[in-house]
Amino acid sequence: MARAGQGGGMGSAVNVGIAVQADWENREFISNISLNVRRLFDFLLRFEATTKSKLASLNEKLDSLERKLEVLEVQVSSATTNPSVFNN
């Protein structure tokens, strides 16, 4: 009977070992997930900054084109109301 008690102790030690191994595997999995979430977050921050910068640049170009278009519209409008401009 003493052997049965010792055998149970070994089984318990094996179970603890299995639990420890499973715990380490879970911690590694969680660590990998955390690392990938951080990488994704960093990517999204960089993407947002780049996108905002490109959109701001595009907005400036559109504003410039709108101003040029307004000047052209005024020139065309004055030319059509005053055809003598074409006779010079």
Image (cartoon, rainbow, N blue to C red):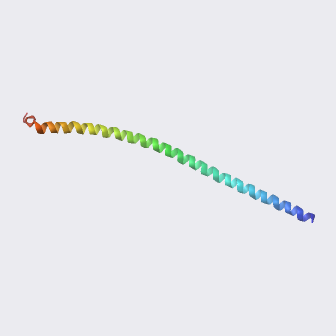
Q: Give x and y (percent) for residue 41.
A: 53, 46
- The extreme front residue here reads 81
**What residue is shown at x 62% (from left), y 51% (from top)?**
32
Q: Which residue is outermost to the top? A: 88
Identify the image quadrant of the N terminus.
Answer: bottom right
Image quadrant where one finds the C terminus: top left
Query: Which residue is depicted at the point 20% across and 38% down?
Result: 72
Tally the numbered discs.
Answer: 0
Q: Is residue 20 above or below residue 87?
A: below
Q: Position of residue 76 (x, y in %)?
A: 16, 39
Q: Is 87 above or below relative to 2? A: above
The residue most toward the right is 2
Q: Residue, x 85% and y 60% (percent of image)?
A: 9
The location of residue 24, given as percent across then percent down, is 70, 53
* Left or right: where 74 falls relative to 65: left
Residue 87 in the image, given as x and y percentages of width and height: 7, 35
Query: Seen in the image, is 75 located left or right of residue 45?
Result: left
Decide if residue 33 is on the left or right side of residue 24.
left
Q: Residue at x 31, y 38 (%)?
A: 63
